[in-house]
Image: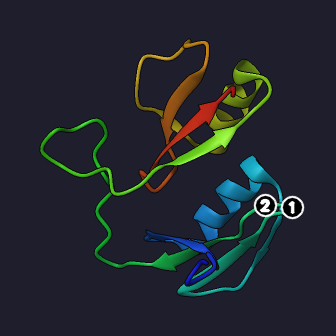
Amino acid sequence: MALAKLGVVVLDCPDPRALAGFYAGVLGGTVEGEGDWVDLNVPGGQALAFQRAPEFVPPKWPAADASQQLHLDLVVEDLDEAEKGVLELGAKPLAEQGGSSFRVYADPAGHPFCLCAC
């Protein structure tokens, strides 16, 4: 028996509204809220939330001497099409791209995420 149910995944960032807008462009959904806490309600998926962290330092990837903190795996049907879209939204490649099953990027606040053709 589970002790709890996952409510929301929260990403610290310097600008919650802007980062929620980035992920809304990637995942769809509705951005709600202003200020220090903004929610992204994704249709049929797990909600994401974004919390202002004034002293935010982006994770390093890959770095043996620093933690990446967390990363999101986003499942896509067409890697090339999804890559084009996330780059237009402001993502930055974190590794040599062109792989056949996944590609690694940083969102505008620096959090790593992967596009996965699973």
Would you call the spot at circle 1 few (<14 residues within 10 Å), some (14-19), or many (20 or more)?
A: few
**Residue extending furthest toward the right:** 43
Residue at image mark 2: 45
**Residue extending furthest toward the left:** 65
Residue at image location 61% in from the left, 12% down from the top:
100
- The x, y position of residue 104, in whole percent, is 49, 32
- The answer to whether 23 appears left or right of 58 in the picture is right
- The answer to whether 53 appears left or right of 78 in the picture is left
Task: State the scheme by which the image is colored.
Answer: rainbow
Residue at image mark 1: 44
Residue at image location 60% in from the left, 19% down from the top:
101
| Quarter residue 32 falls in | bottom right
- The x, y position of residue 106, in whole percent, is 47, 43
Above or below: residue 59 compared with residue 39? above
- The answer to whether 94 appears left or right of 67 in the picture is right
Amino acid type assigned to the residue bearing label 1 in the image: Gly
State which quarter of the image contains the N terminus.
bottom right
Above or below: residue 22 compared with residue 115? below
Mark 2 secondary-structure assignment? loop
Mark 1 secondary-structure assignment? loop
In the image shown, does 1 or 78 lie closer to the viewer? 1
| Quarter residue 115 falls in | top right
Amino acid type assigned to the residue bearing label 2 in the image: Gly
